[in-house]
Image: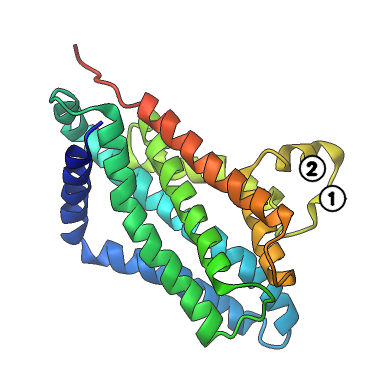
Amino acid sequence: MSATRTLATARRVLRQLAHDPRTIALLLLVPVLLTVLLYYVYADDRELFDRIGASLLGIFPMITMFLVTSIATLRERTSGTLERLLSMPLGKADLILGYALAFGLLAVAQAALATGVTIWFLDLDFAGSPWLLLLIALLDALLGTALGLFVSAFAATEFQAVQFMPALILPQLLLCGLLTPRDTMQPVLEAVSNVLPLSYAVDGMNEVLRNSGVTGDLVRDIAIVAGSALLVLLLGAATLRRRTP
């Protein structure tokens, strides 16, 4: 693995994204606009907005980063760019880390903007540190990036890539505890929710919402989300292979 090659890959991806300012604008603004919409939906029930808003602060970045990353990476695969890169003296780790770094920088900007607007403009009421909210939102965005890199290997078209969202993201959204507490679900559904990383992202946001300090549960939640993102990145690296001899 070479830091020079990793950074060169990241710069190339960022240059390509720079030629599509509308995508970047949507990537940065959609989570913010959806959170603002939620704020006005629950204008008469601030307590409910605080509970749901904190959770969605991590969910929205994950969804948008998943979509953008999966489609952008799929274009690289179908255009033959990845094939040509893999024929060069460029390690899989350099390539996957370069992509992760480029999209990760966008994830940082997206998570920071969404968190800042939610805290200071929408006045989200929470007991913990805003930096912890930002950390969990960023990890969620990075998890979405990793999932997007991974699933791009299994899609032949952009339409297929989009279809992975209801297959991978929506079940997590339904079972993560946002709609109903996980401990009130049917035992089978609760068991499934216990292995989904988004469940721990929501749990982590709720810990920051309720507690002023760093609890053991919060450390566990952060570690699971971060570990899941790393694991999926490693799986994504395993899918980077030449399709022609």
**Res. 173 visible in picture:** no
Relative placement, left or right, of 121 versus 124 is left
- Which sits in the foreground, 165 or 98? 98
Residue under label 1, please give it.
Answer: 183
Secondary structure found at label 2 = helix
* Place of residue 242 in the rendered image (x, y in percent of width and height, measured from the top left): 24, 20
- Farthest residue in the top direction? 245
| Quarter that holds the N terminus | top left
Secondary structure found at label 1 = helix
- Which sits in the foreground, 210 or 33? 210
**Res. 187 visible in picture:** yes
* Place of residue 185 in the rendered image (x, y in percent of width and height, measured from the top left): 83, 48
Residue 192's image quarter?
top right
Hey, what amino acid is under mark 1? Asp
Q: Name the residue at 65% across, 53% down.
A: 219
Residue under label 2, please give it.
Answer: 190
Asked if marks 1 and 2 touch (Cβ < 8 Å), the reply is yes
Hey, what amino acid is under mark 2? Glu
* Place of residue 2 in the rendered image (x, y in percent of width and height, measured from the top left): 21, 34
Q: Name the residue at 50% across, 34% down.
A: 231
